[in-house]
Image: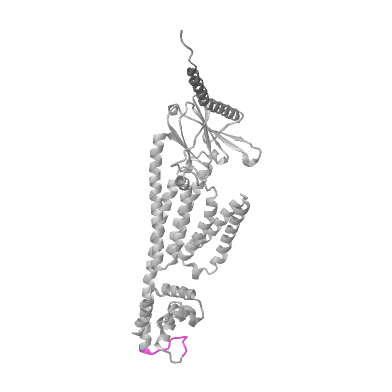
Amino acid sequence: MNCFQPTQYRTFYPRIIILILLLLPGVFVNGQTADRSSSLEKEISGLIFKPLKKAPSFSFAEQPGPKKEQTAYWLKGKLDTHQLNQPLSLQISSSHLHHTSLYSYKNGQFIEIKEQENLARYDQFNFQTDSNVYYLKSSDALLKQLPLVLMDAQSFQEKEGKRLLRIGFYYGLGLMSIIFNFVFFLIFKDKRFIAYCFLQIGVFVEFFYEDGMFYYLSSGELVMNNLLVYTVPFTAAFACVFSYYFLDLKDTHKNYWRYVGPVIALALLTLVLFTIFKWEAFLPIVDLLSFLSAIIPISIAISRFKKDVYARFLVLTFGIIVIFGAGYVLNMNFNLPWLAAFDMDALRMVSAFEIISIGFAITFKVRALQEEKEHYRTEINKYLVEFKESALVVPGISNLPLSNEEDTLMILQKDFLLTERETEVLQGIWEGLTNQELANKLFISPNTVKYHISNLYVKLDVKSRTQALRIKDKVNV
């Protein structure tokens, strides 16, 4: 007969209790999951899905909320038989559509698919299902435009890798162009380069957003739904500044900023009001004003199309960008088959062509201007020699005897369009005065002296005080 051993019960019962405690959370979670699954199925069964005309395999439904902004939009899609129980990837290919949820069946249970958070340019889901039906839920009606990419996981990774390679090439080209234009500005002191540099930065940021790269690099943290609202008016302003310098409108259109300035200012004011009040009715006004401000320089370029080769160049390059940009916007909003060619890849390719073309055009124009200035300098020196030999008095100059330096200053002022203040600063440079001594003599600040010296360097095509002194020496010879 076995003896009763109480120590066995002392270890047996605690083990049973621990096992029950370990199993309880799983039972509780499974219960919650089942309840959640049942709730979702009940929620969907109450919706009326209507097939989309442009894609009958998809159905769309609206789920009204207590408030209009709480309305939910559902999209019902179908899978082919060969896609069942296979690893799939679904991407919402729009930087304007986030916080989307994906639901599908697995082992007979209706579940929510977890979104991929790392290394994804847009909302992306990796899943397997044994049902040919899946559902997408969003708070944005843009879901109806079907910005979807759905394929087996391996094919998707290969396609996405190639696309990232093309994207990297474009941004490498854009960044290199920005750096080169900035360096050229430092070398030539020509405002066309720096104006185009800022225009490229604006376009760069917009493309970076549309390509989902902010979202990609931040692992889904940077959504920035209203980024384009802020970048578009500034990019339009940069386009106006660039056109002003590229087309040399300073002398031919002196009222240019009188028309462009108020439109840009009104766009920025509307942007400030949107930031404060968050009223979406301001958004189309900002876009319209930005568009109008950019139309003004394009209209001027069209009016000079026959006379100015650079105007023709600007109209053609910007015109192609506008056509593809409009096509891309229409494609995003209407998703029609004949608009399929106007995607981000096509827009990026056109933009790359524009970057290279405009860069070459600016360089060619600045080079032509430099040669023209050199020609004028030669002519001035020739004229001054003839002037000294014939001992003639320059028209418009007093008949009183003038020193060689005064004669030279008057001639340079006339032929290089120097202002009175720039002429006084040039004379101070010839006298060997420092910036501070010039400021004291002319009763202006040292910064103002630097500003006039910078303008002098551009107009005389020199890069230092030494070269400015050589102009005097050449004339005296």
Image: 415 above or below 316 = below
Q: Residue furthest right?
A: 66
Q: Residue furthest top?
A: 1
The C terminus lies in which quarter of the figure? bottom left
Where residue 77 sits: x, y (%)? 51, 32
Q: Is residue 289 visible?
A: yes
Image: 169 above or below 183 = above
Q: Residue furthest bottom?
A: 400
Q: Quadrant of residue 191?
A: bottom left
Where residue 150 sits: x, y (%)? 46, 35
In this picture, which residue range is highlighted in magenta?
Answer: 389-398
At 55% from the left and 57% from the top, the residue drawn is 292
Q: Quadrant of residue 458?
A: bottom left
Asked if the magenta segment contains residue 396, the reply would be yes
Where residue 96 sits: x, y (%)? 52, 45
Front one among 37 and 211: 37
Using residue 349 as the reference point, say whether residue 104 is left or right of it.
Answer: right
Q: How many marks?
A: 0
At 38% from the left and 42% from the top, the residue drawn is 162
Where residue 445 sits: x, y (%)? 50, 76
Asked if the magenta segment contains residue 180, the reply would be no
Q: Is residue 357 visible?
A: no
